[in-house]
Image (spheres, helix red, strand yellow):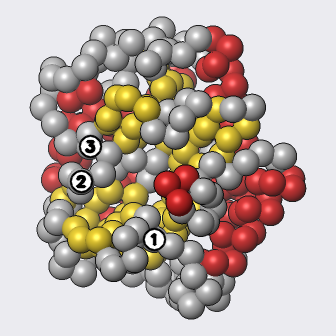
Amino acid sequence: MTKQPRELALLAESGRLLASVFALLDRTPLIGMSTLQIDELVERFIVDDLKARPASKGQYGYGFVLNSSVNDVVCHGIPSQSTVLRDGDIVNLDITLEKNGYIADSSKTYLVGAVNPAARKLVQTTYEAMWMGIQAVRPGARLGDIGWAIERHAKRNGYSVVHEYCGHGIGREMHEEPQILHFGKPGTGLALREGMVFTIEPMLNRGRRSVKTEADGWTVVTSDGSLSAQFEHTVAVTASGVQVLTLRPDEAKSGPARRIAAARGH
């Protein structure tokens, strides 16, 4: 369950490369693109430019490089030529990358064009909730501390937290132990230890937390048709706290990242 220093270094390299994929997407005008075009763009970049492997493709029989979850899609949205991003949409792009046998996993919800204030607030709150969970990570903390921090922030802002999907340990396999719930009670659950690596990936809904899976067997949507947003990072428990292995260039000097770096003495 815990990783050795050499493994952590390899995971950090995979995380750095995956962060560069999101930097590419940040520069890409998404309006008018189909989610399949985004999938193809990301695959070319990972394979040709980064000399890495898109770890989701072929996993559990899945045929694409990423999940593209638009508006009321909670997670696992399948890229499609017919799904074209339009002004005002929100879309979560969830991407995995393997390099040298180690996998990193991250996602970001993008605002496409002129997004209305209610959708913007949902996306911003979801991002903040992820960071609340990340900031709870340190040796000796409990898994329940992470979930409680996320759920408290979501509920304070009037949103529900999806219970059916959770974060997970990660390393040579995409899904390892432990499971990281995004709700819980402080002081409960497994104690965190230095060297543990896992994802934190809360999904928040504007309406009820209930979800349903569509007929394709993959796409998960909100039961009431309300908007949903998600963010995800791969993190490692360090001796002094936490390291975000998939930290993106635009986040490096953000408030949450600065606070974590200060706590680690950097």
Residue at image coords 21%, 52%:
163
Observer-nearest of 160 and 172:
172
Q: Is residue 153 left or right of residue 259?
A: left
- The tag earlier along the polypeptide, 3 or 1, is 1
Q: Is residue 160 visible?
A: yes
Secondary structure of the residue carrying numbered label 1:
loop
Nearest-to-viewer mark from 3 and 1 = 1
- The 10 Å Cα crowd at callout 3, few under 14, some 14 to 19, many 20 or more, is many
Dot 1 corresponds to which residue? Answer: 77
State how far apart marks 3 and 2 are (Cα).
Answer: 10 Å
- The tag earlier along the polypeptide, 3 or 2, is 2
> x, y (%) of residue 128?
37, 48
Dot 2 corresponds to which residue? Answer: 164
> Toward which corner of the image does residue 204 lie, by quadrant?
bottom left
Q: Is residue 130 visible?
A: no
Residue at image coords 65%, 32%:
102
> Toward which corner of the image does residue 196 lie, by quadrant?
top left
> x, y (%) of residue 84?
57, 88
Image quadrant where one finds the C terminus: top right
Q: Is residue 203 left or right of residue 162?
A: right
Q: Amino acid at mark 2?
A: Glu
Secondary structure of the residue carrying numbered label 3:
loop
Q: Amino acid at mark 1?
A: Gly
- Relative to 82, residue 257 above or below: above
Nearest-to-viewer mark from 3 and 2 = 2
Secondary structure of the residue carrying numbered label 2:
loop
